[in-house]
Amino acid sequence: MSVNSDSIYGTKASPITYDYEWGTVTCKPGKVFLHVFNWKANYKDMIVLYGLINKVKKASLLADSSRNVKVIQEYNEELAYNNLKVMLPGNAPDAYDSVISLEIEGELKIDDILLQQPDGRIILNSFQAIVHKGREESQMHLSSGGVIEKWFNKDDWLSWDFKVIEPGEYELNLLTKTDFWGEWDFDHEVTIGVAEQEIGCTVKDDEKYHDKPLHYQDRCMKCGRVSFKNAGNYTLTIKPIVLHSENNRGLSLRSINLVPVK
């Protein structure tokens, strides 16, 4: 803990709000910390971070500041996004949390649009959505856990603006969540629209979850496939057709995930 204390105490969660196979990110003024839990996660000898605008002045292992880390920063002018490649120097210095410290110029800045990530996934979290309320008295809200809850009103809907780096075919998955006691409402019907395509999806109760731990279950609905013919900016919308509230939960939405078809 003492070795990594600078990356823990006095830091805050990074505004780079993506899930990475290799770990997570924290930051403090002038520094960004890459917590690498899986040293050889996907790119073998490097990890890739999209969206960081600031110039990196120095990169080093927090456990040994004398071991500098090579970084390559690129800006894709055609698609307008920033790309940082961090070369992993040999073996992991820690079995659980190897921290790479990035000293940056100025106040932390990131690209202001959601980006497809290096592993190919496009993760559209509920806390990143643009909320469109059809009525002032709507109960739909974002919980402290980042989940849209109490979605009872069919006039309410959500949208996300995002950038596709790699065009192709994607599986479209909807992630919902039960409450602490495992209670939820289901059989909701929604329409998801993106890239001039519309996919209907029914949020069903799947028996495969019934033997899982009760509390706060994440449930994944496979909605179908969509295609992006070109790289660039897109908007995805989700609009309800039928909503249920037998358990006074309504539709709960954690995220919509687009996973490339291999």
Image: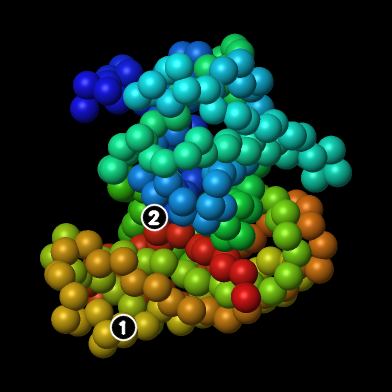
Element type at mark 1: loop
Q: Whole-Å distance between the Cαs marked 1 and 2?
A: 18 Å
Looking at the image, residue 77 sits to the left or right of residue 72; the answer is: right
Residue 250: where, in percent of width, then height?
33, 67
For image coordinates 21% across by 27% down, the residue present is 1
Which of the two discs, 1 and 2, labels the residue nearer the N terminus?
A: 2
- Using the rendered image of the protein, determine whether residue 166 is visible from the camera's viewpoint: yes
Residue 88: where, in percent of width, then height?
52, 39
Looking at the image, residue 148 sits to the left or right of residue 116; the answer is: left
- Is the residue marked by circle 2 packed among few (<14), some (14-19), or many (20+) residues within 10 Å? many
* 120 and 178: which is toward the camera: 120
Whether 171 is drawn above or below 46: the answer is below
Viewer-nearest of labels 1 and 2? 1
For image coordinates 42% across by 46% down, the residue present is 39
For image coordinates 73% across by 39% down, the residue present is 81
For image coordinates 39% across by 49% down, the residue present is 38
Residue 76: where, in percent of width, then height?
79, 40
What residue does disc 2 label?
148
Badge 1 amino acid: Asp
Quadrant of the rendered structure where residue 10 is?
Answer: top left
Badge 2 amino acid: Ile
What residue does disc 1 label?
205
Quadrant of the rendered structure where residue 77 is?
Answer: top right
Whether 185 is drawn above or below 70: the answer is below
- Is the residue marked by circle 1 packed among few (<14), some (14-19), or many (20+) residues within 10 Å? some
Element type at mark 2: strand
